[in-house]
Image (tube, helix red, strand yellow):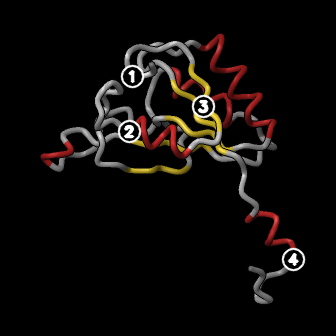
Amino acid sequence: MKDDCFPDEFYPALTRLPIVGVMGSGVRSHEELAEPLGRRLARLGVHLLTGGGRGVMESVSRAFASVEDRAGLVIGVLPLHGADAGEEADPGYPNRWVEIVVSTHLGREGASPDSRNHVNVLTSDVVVALPGSAGTA
């Protein structure tokens, strides 16, 4: 819905970009895979969504953010450590390249039904899985 209060050049910014979720190891960076992928995604004009932590999440986010003329943003869906106890988020979350933080009450363990993997996959238009462990699977 267009509102005459905003100039026409404001509206292209409201166009929804596709969201590409990249899942992978939170320990190993797999830079040889993650960095070229991150740069390529940034040039495709999409948003990048990860779990917002270290490993593959950090490598792909860093590479994506390094592309100066990109249109998309880095989105991190974060776990909450000790969600039942109301504790603060885990150290290392979000990594420094996350531009939009999605805070959750969900845990870190990817294999758990209470993990944030459901949010990551359901929010993404496309999911790319890089090497990881049970949580990535």
Disc 2 marks a residue whose amino acid type is Arg
N-terminal-most mark, 3 or 1: 3
Residue 14 in the image: x percent, y percent?
Answer: 73, 65
Name above or below for residue 30 compared with residue 116.
above
Name above or below for residue 11 compared with residue 124.
below
N-terminal-most mark, 2 or 3: 2
Disc 4 marks a residue whose amino acid type is Asp
Mark 2 surroundings within 10 Å by alpha-carbon count, few (fewer than 14), some (14 through 19), many (20 or more)? many
| Residue toward you, 90 or 11 | 11
Residue 74 in the image: x percent, y percent?
Answer: 60, 43
- Res 92 → quadrant: top left
Disc 1 marks a residue whose amino acid type is Gly
Residue on which the image places disc 2? 116
Q: CA distance from mark 2 to mark 3?
A: 14 Å
Question: Judging from the image, what secondary structure is the residue with disc 1 in?
Answer: loop
Question: Residue at horizontal 77%, vertical 28%?
Answer: 40
Tell me the tag on residue 135: 1
Question: Residue at horizontal 82%, vertical 65%?
Answer: 12
Mark whose residue sits in front, 4 or 2: 2
Quadrant in which the C terminus appears: top left
Q: CA distance from mark 4 to mark 3?
A: 33 Å
Disc 3 marks a residue whose amino acid type is Val
Q: CA distance from mark 3 to mark 1?
A: 14 Å
N-terminal-most mark, 2 or 1: 2
Tell me the tag on residue 127: 3
